[in-house]
Image (cartoon, rainbow, N blue to C red):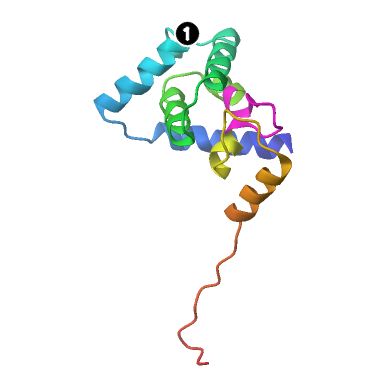
Amino acid sequence: MKFIQKQQVELIIQQACKENFTDSEKAIYDDFILEAGVKDPAKMTEATADALIRYLNGCDASNEFVANVVNRLAQVAPAHIMTKILLSDNDGDGVPLYQEIQLGTKATVFNTPSEIAAAQQKQYQFFPIRNSDIEL
C-alpha cells in the first residue's frame, strides 16, 4: 500500500508543477503559505511541514483551495516535504490529504467511514458508454 501511495503522491507533485497560476493566484496561495509559518517553501523542513499541516487543520478552507495551496507549494517545496504533507492525515480520519482531495471529502474535517465509502463509491462509479451500433 505504501508503494501505491508514494506513486500517487509523485504523480500529484508532477501534475502540480505543470499548474499555471496567474500572478494574483500565486500571491493568494503564497500569502496563505506564509501565514501558515512557511517563510521560504524551497527550504521547508519537517517542522515547517508540520506547522503547515496544523494550520490547514485549523482553517475552514474548501478542498479546491487546499488543493491549489498544495499545487502551489509543490512547485517550490522539496519533494520529500511534499510527500510528508500529501501523506498527512490532518483531520485524523485515516484518509491521507492527497486522497481527501481526490475523493472530495473535507480535508480539514473528520469524515466517518460511511462518508468516506460514499465518496469512494461516487468517485469510482461506472457509466457505460453508449454504443450507437446497438438498436433497442
Residue 128 coordinates in the image, percent (x, y): 55, 72
Residue 133, compared with residue 108, is above or below; it is below
Residues in magenta? 85-97
Residue 97 coordinates in the image, percent (x, y): 59, 31
Residue 129, compared with residue 25, is above or below; it is below
* Residue drawn at (67%, 35%) of the image: 95
What main secondary structure does the magenta stretch of the protein show? loop
Q: Quadrant of residue 22?
A: top left
Along the line of sight, the residue nearer the viewer: 34 or 117: 117
Residue 75, compared with residue 18, is above or below; it is above
Outermost residue toward the bottom in this view: 136
Q: Quarter of the image containing the N terminus?
A: top right
Residue 60 coordinates in the image, percent (x, y): 49, 26
Residue type pointed to by label 1: Gly
| 91 within the magenta span | yes
Numbered-mark total: 1
* Residue drawn at (61%, 48%) of the image: 119
Q: Name the residue under label 1.
A: 37
| 42 within the magenta span | no
